[in-house]
């Protein structure tokens, strides 16, 4: 003690006083047999474990069965180390109520050289339940956000990309094509006589036709392509890094697949089957905008309509940019 420093008060409390007054459940466990040799009053209040029932018992008998092996291992490790060890277990209380305990264990040397393990237990049930609820809420929030994200980019009926997402992807593809000098193509599709099909067979049948056509688009497109519902019975495919010849092959596959597909009420259509008219346009460089390529594909589509439907028409050469 340095000069002028006030003397410390005498420490008159002994271990038994501290052990009994602790607000958290406490146990002394024989370091060899792991039997309980002492227990404090807080154990009975928190865990419902009386002195008579605890003394001489193995604490593992009161734990969830799946925790017993880990608990025994933690006790063995605590006995070999002279510093605090913390671990968690699930205590099975009265009425099978489970209590989550956080245990701090350390070695104590008793009179006569006998060693014991001191276990101080803290009830963390409420904390763990709150953490579990928080984690469950976060998982549900992630799922909800993913659904909302899908709704913002997906057409609800067909599960294809929606118009908004298509326009965004087309803009990015156009910028990439300009930067690296690579082509891309647009395949523009319109189901022939769709209004007639709807009027004759009802809107549920028309909705099913749209869904079936969307499934055909998905099956024929590559993973690289983006199929989208443009609006109503109009659909588009963005063929990334694809020249017009490759897009024409895809368009013809789509047309043939639709003409051969056994749609309900197909024989009532003017051609005797459900058909689709398609226009194809390619971006191959130059001062064109994505709107110019889309417009060229749309105009090619209407030439398919005027030519008798159920056909594919390619835009005649690079489309001219609109002058404004």
Image (spheres, grey):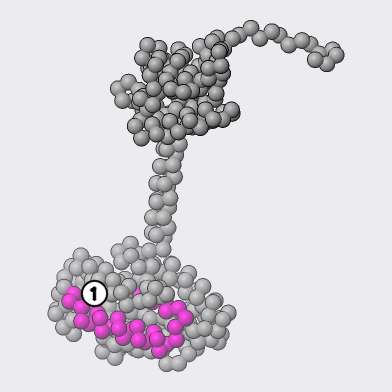
Residue 275 in the image, given as x and y percentages of width and height: 24, 81
Which residue lies at the image location 47% right of the left edge and 81% below the top edge?
241
Question: In the image, which residues are magenta?
Answer: 234-263
Magenta highlight on residue 246:
yes
Q: Is residue 301 visible?
A: no
Q: Is residue 286 left or right of residue 32?
A: right
Please give the name of the residue rendered at 26% of the width and 84% of the height, measured from the top-left corner.
256
Q: Considering depth in this image, is 234 or 245 the residue closer to the camera? A: 245
**Tag 1: Cα neighbours inside 10 Å, few (<14), some, or many (≥20)?**
some
Q: Residue at x 30, y 74 (%)?
A: 219
- Who's the residue at 38% across and 67% down the image? 161
Q: Is residue 202 left or right of residue 189?
A: left
Quadrant into which the C terminus falls: bottom right
- Write down the residue under mark 1: 195
Residue 187 seen in the current view: yes
Classify residue 12 by image quadrant: top right
Q: Residue 270 in the image: x percent, y percent?
A: 18, 83
List x then y, in percent, for residue 216: 28, 75
- Examine the rendered structure and indicate whether residue 264 appears above or below residue 28: below
Q: Mark 1: which secondary structure?
A: helix
Q: Residue furthest front?
A: 112
């Amino acid at each position: 003690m340095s000069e002028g420093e006030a003397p410390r008060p005498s420490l008159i409390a002994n271990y038994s006083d501290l052990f009994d007054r602790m607000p958290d459940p406490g146990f002394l466990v024989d370091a060899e047999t792991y039997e309980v040799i002492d227990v404090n009053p807080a154990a009975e209040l928190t865990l419902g474990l009386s002195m008579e029932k605890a003394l001489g018992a193995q604490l593992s008998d009161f734990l969830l069965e799946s925790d017993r092996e880990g608990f025994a291992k933690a006790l063995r490790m605590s006995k070999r180390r002279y510093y605090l060890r913390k671990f968690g277990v699930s205590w099975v209380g009265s009425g099978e109520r489970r209590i989550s305990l956080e245990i701090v264990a350390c070695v104590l040397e008793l009179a006569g050289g006998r060693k014991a393990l001191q276990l101080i237990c803290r009830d963390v049930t409420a904390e763990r339940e709150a953490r579990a609820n928080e984690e469950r809420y976060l998982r549900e929030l992630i799922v909800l956000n993913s659904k909302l994200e899908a709704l913002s980019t997906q057409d609800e009926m067909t599960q294809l990309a929606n118009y908004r997402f298509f326009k965004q992807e087309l803009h990015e593809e156009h910028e990439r094509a300009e930067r690296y000098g690579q082509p891309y193509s647009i395949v523009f599709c319109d189901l022939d006589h769709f209004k007639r099909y709807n009027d004759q067979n009802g809107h549920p049948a028309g909705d099913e036709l749209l869904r079936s056509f969307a499934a055909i688009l998905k099956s024929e497109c590559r993973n690289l392509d983006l199929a989208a519902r443009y609006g109503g019975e109009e659909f588009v495919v963005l063929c990334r890094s694809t020249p017009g010849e490759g897009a024409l092959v895809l368009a013809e596959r789509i047309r043939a697949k639709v003409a051969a597909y056994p749609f309900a009420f197909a024989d009532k259509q003017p051609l005797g089957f459900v058909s689709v008219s398609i226009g194809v346009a390619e971006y191959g460089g130059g001062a064109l905008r994505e709107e110019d390529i889309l417009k060229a594909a749309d105009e090619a589509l209407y030439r398919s309509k005027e030519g008798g439907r159920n056909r594919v028409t390619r835009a005649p050469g690079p489309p001219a940019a609109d002058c404004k």
